[in-house]
Image (cartoon, rainbow, N blue to C red):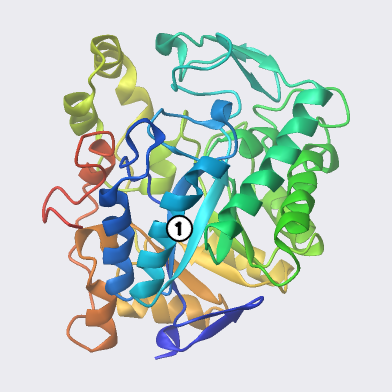
Amino acid sequence: MKAFETWKLAGLTLRNRIIKTATFEGLCKNGVISDELINFHKRHAEGGVGLSTVAYGAVSPDARTFNDQILLEEDSVPTLTKLTDAIHGAGAAASIQLAHAGGFTRASGRSTWVTKGPSGGVNSYGMLSGYPVMVPLNHSDIDKIVDDYGSAAAIAKKAGFDAVEIHMGHGYMLSQFLSPATNKRTDDYGGILDNRLRLPLRIVKSVRNAVGDDFPILVKTNLSDGFRAGLKIDEAILIAQALEKAGVNALVMSGGFVSKTPMYLFRGDSPLQEMIKAEKNPIHKLMLKVGGSKIFKDMPFEENYFRDHALKIRKAVQMPLVYLGGVRTVDNIKKALNDGFEAVAMGRPLLHDPDLLNKYKNGIETISACTNCNLCVGVMDTPQGVHCVITGQPK
């Protein structure tokens, strides 16, 4: 089966073409990398993935969405090295997301009570955490962020990561710049797509300069934001072409906006009730009860649900593409690879059963038992971190 053949990505040879996609683990209390986080990724490596992606490595203190996220700084190198050593010891390669919250955050301890994004406005995501106002990043701010991404990438490489994934999707900062719905700037960083691409492309260059030519740089980007005023597939194609020209090694194709259309990414049952149950802040809990149903609505699940959009990207670029979205069966994997995508990324099915890929490879199973209940999403911020509520995995 092609999925379990080795795959060379830039200067890295992976044991197969299956990537454990980043799922916020919730296992870094106050930013400290825990043994539980190390075991989480070791468990997925033991289960057979070729590349395990550590979620949300913040490129600066103000880049976090929550307090319990990794900060890619020099002090983190020893524990990050323990993490990458554990993944390598189980036979897989390690990647980490490079991310910035931009205009929305709920992380405490920031330097000011405002957040900074492409444009000014209300930070509805962090209003109840004391950060109600977004202001536009100035050019000095932008220059510093470009440098922060480069520094974070260098830290990741020093700590033994084999690849980095620049997060340009899901409504985080670079997604905010790319989306016409959230980028209302009138300078060189706003307006036409070439301008909205300016910061993302500067960051790709900064990261490349930091890690060298043979080090894999993946980018996660949206095929669509999933709402009327947001990014659409026609511009997503142009973004993919620009990233290919900039020397990105692979594109992980996704969709949805955390603060507006999270279910466009997840599909299936809404996790709202589990989120309400898990929420510690009483005001946040009340707001979820009152307004959460407007954002977290059930959305029909179908296998390979991003396929039609992803095929349009496939026709437009030659660069390696990673298919993500609704992969549940061996046939889904085969279909994606037969469509011309070089690799497949999986999330929830591997939370349900970290050994699933070994079972696929050995012919023990062909279908994931994941029910798309999305309860795993609702428990990300609990002490146990993200896990399958049905099976209790991974442990």
Answer with left or right where residue 271 lies relative to residue 69.
left
Q: Quadrant of residue 298?
A: top left
Q: Residue at x 26, y 15 (%)?
A: 281
Q: The residue under label 1 is which amino acid type?
A: Thr
Quarter of the picture containing the N terminus is bottom left
Question: Where residue 235 sits: x, y (%)?
Answer: 72, 48
Residue under the point 19% across and 42% down: 384
Work out whether 75 lies above or below 118.
below
> Residue at left 39%, top 58%?
82
Q: Which percent across, then down, holds residue 367?
A: 22, 74
Is 305 situated above or below 124? below
Using the image as rendered, state which of residue 252 and residue 383 is in the foreground.
383
Residue 196 visible in this rendered orientation of the protein = yes
- Asked if residue 138 lies left or right of residue 290, the reply is right
> Is 349 drawn above or below residue 201 in the view shown?
below
Please, which residue is most extreme toward the right here? 188
Tell me, yes or no, if residue 222 can be seen here.
Answer: no
Along the line of sight, the residue nearer the viewer: 372 or 201: 201
Q: Position of residue 307 (x, y in %)?
A: 50, 64
Q: Quadrant of residue 18?
A: bottom left
Q: How many residues crowd around disc 1 within 10 Å: few (fewer than 14), some, or many (20 or more)?
A: some
Viewer-proximal residue, 229 or 64? Answer: 64
Q: Secondary structure at mark 1?
A: helix
Q: Is residue 290 left or right of residue 55?
A: left
Residue 362 falls in which quadrant of the image? bottom left
Give the number of marks.
1
Out of 220 and 260, give the one closest to the viewer.
220
> Mark 1 highlights which residue?
81
- Residue at (19, 51) in percent of width and height: 388
